[in-house]
Image (cartoon, rainbow, N blue to C red):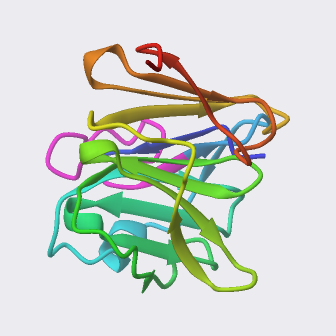
Amino acid sequence: PLLFLDIIDRGIDRDPEYPGGRGGVAAETGEGLVDFQENFLEKIPTSTYWYDIKFRDMAQGWIVGLAGTTLHTGDGGQSWRKVHSYTIQNLFSIDLGKEDFAFGSVGTALRFSENPENGWHNIKDIESINWLRGTAFSSDREVGWVVGGSGTIFKTEDGGQTWQQLFPPKQ
């Protein structure tokens, strides 16, 4: 499984000894570093701001960014397709539990579903006016956390099917 993805900025890193090399992308797989193709970053459209990128494996990946923009690859970054998120809010974080999740400004919380309708859908259990910025799932993808503004914390223990607000306490 893919554990870490590091994108090296072409303008900063020119050291061939650094993982990923000159403007490349390296992924930690648990079995050492694996380089993606040198032109990986050139395949990503640059017409928006990107906030997060995650890969489920060496082929399946997502990028999220400004104004609800989401891109998906199924071929390790050789090509990217835009997937409509049905939001204009910025998406700051993406994580891959048993399903794929994106979180952003003004409490935006989305789940990607392939069945019965492909696309992003609001997560009903997450109601917040605060931005949601960071996410993490356990290695078994059952337990997950979402954190955000004003100390907001949500937790799932069933792979994202249901979410519980831990802080601030619901009134």
Q: Residue drawn 42% across and 74% down?
A: 71
Q: Residue drawn 22% across and 53% down?
A: 10
User: Farthest residue toward the front?
Assistant: 171
Q: Residue drawn 27% across and 33% down?
A: 130
- Residue 30 point in image, percent of width and height: 77, 34
Q: Is residue 9 visible?
A: yes
Q: Nearer the viewer, residue 115 or 43?
A: 115
Q: Is residue 52 above or below residue 151?
A: below
Specify the quadrant of the image occupied by residue 145: top right
Q: Nearer the viewer, residue 126 or 149?
A: 126
- Quadrant for the C terminus, please: top left
Q: Is residue 52 above or below residue 80?
A: above
Q: Nearer the viewer, residue 116 or 92?
A: 116
Classify residue 38 as left or right of residue 89: right
Q: Is residue 52 above or below residue 49?
A: above
**Residue 14 lies in magenta, yes or no?**
yes
Q: Is residue 39 visible?
A: no
- The span picked out in magenta is 9-26
Q: Nearer the viewer, residue 134 or 165?
A: 165
- Residue 4 point in image, percent of width and height: 58, 38
- Residue 133 point in image, percent of width and height: 35, 34
**Residue 125 lies in magenta, yes or no?**
no
Q: Residue drawn 59% across and 67% down?
A: 112
- Residue 84 point in image, percent of width and height: 40, 81
Name the main secondary structure of what is drawn in magenta.
loop
Specify the quadrant of the image occupied by residue 93: top left
